[in-house]
Image (cartoon, rainbow, N blue to C red):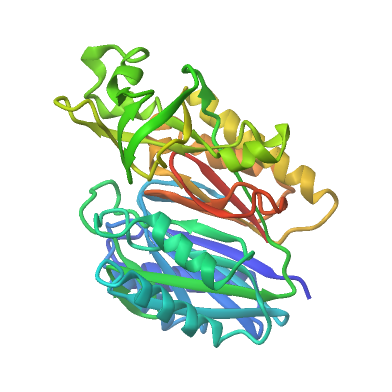
Amino acid sequence: MSIQAATANSENFEDSYEAGQELAETILDKIELRKGKIGLLYCTMEFDLNELLRGVQEHIDVPIVGCTTYSQATEDGYCEEAASLLVLTSDDLEVGIGLGQGLSRDMEAAVSHACETARRGLQGEPRLILTFPDVALTPTVSAEAVLAALQRRFPGVPIAGGLPGDSGKFKQTHQFLGDQVYTDAIPVILLGGDIRPVVMIGSGWIPTGTPAIATKAERNVLREIDHQPAIEYIGKYIPSQRLGDPEVMGTWPLAVYDDRLRAISEKYKDYAVMRSPFQYDKETGSIIYAGEIPNGAPVRLAKGSREDVIHGAADVAERLMSHLGDRDISCLMFFSCGGRKLVLGLKTPQEVQTLRGALPKDIPICGLYVYGEIAPIDSTDPNLNQVRFHNTTLVLCAL
């Protein structure tokens, strides 16, 4: 039996318990629950999180996992302040769930506990991993380190998800499991059984700057490009009076290339991970990015307009549907960057509209805007299936 999927949405943040009840009842009106089931709950910070979870769990018999977001969307449209629930269910679906706490104190222990707990829920091997680690606002552990720890435990399994948000406040994010609310935690969802997930990314950013090399970088701090202060390279393209403006800097992400891919064949030379700048040091000329940049990596400044960002969404949706061919899918999950939302502004709803237009009619869609995206470049290509941490990128995951 194929997976049944359904979404529900509520903007009733004045009564969070009632909002949870509304979500549960809407799902039950749409689908019949089977043996294998999982509920993915996402919400913005306007809700009483404990009451929202209580309202959901008291009205639907589905294990709930999720996180707070910047905002989210379903096939019914984009919502700035809302709670969204996606339920997947099938007799042929296997689900394992785990959560590790104290991620910033002991990353390996937290990841290990989450993975071991989740693994006990599966009889076979996992085919997809979803995760929402709370590392966007913690300087002691990087997303890259967390993803490396996950991939060591489940080599070759595609991993998708994102870093939780807090409605753009950048103070504290939250993760959910059952009816409990956590911080500094990593939820891990293993999906197995009769599923064939496909994960792909797109961005729409256009490489514009002269190709260069990151000659001095320390994690997410880029100090030198071509042996010169990094800001000198960026400053060739952005007027000096606008260098401190986050909105301007955000429209000029850095494309970071992987020499290992380039060495495989010409086919892979243009694949890059995007890095979003958010601060720079006037004294040293260093730029702080939202993700790590390896020393010696080829880099190139990229540029994008609202139209380019929407075109990137259309492009990855077209590539996904082309790969699927005549195969039916049960739902589409997406994870989009809060940086894309900042660029799109009032046109943010066009992103989910673009995805909806590319899919067959009535396919459930559930997506969230996050503080960093998790996915392989393309799970269908063995050379691109390594999980990576992205900025200003759109991740699509079809089931």
Q: Position of residue 53 (x, y in %)?
A: 36, 74
Q: Residue at x 55, y 48 (%)?
A: 395
Left or right of 114, for residue 159: right
Q: Residue at x 54, y 58 (%)?
A: 160
The correct choice, above or below, for 128 with respect to 280 in the image is below
Count the marks: 0
- Regarding residue 274, the answer to whether it shows in the image is yes
Foreground pick, 312 / 78? 312
Left or right of 358, for residue 369: left
- Regarding residue 303, the answer to whether it shows in the image is no
Q: Which residue is most to the right?
A: 326
Look at the image and tell me in which quarter the N terminus lies. Answer: bottom right
Query: Which quadrant of the figure has residue 69?
Result: bottom left
Q: Residue at x 63, y 41 (%)?
A: 261
Q: Residue at x 72, y 53 (%)?
A: 380
Q: Position of residue 202 (x, y in %)?
A: 58, 39
Look at the image and tell me in which quarter the C terminus lies. Answer: bottom right
Left or right of 270, for residue 297: left
Left or right of 71, for residue 239: left
Foreground pick, 253 / 197? 253
The correct choice, above or below, for 119 with respect to 271 in the image is below
Q: Position of residue 51 (x, y in %)?
A: 30, 74
Q: Position of residue 206 (x, y in %)?
A: 53, 23
The correct choice, above or below, for 384 with respect to 31 in the image is above
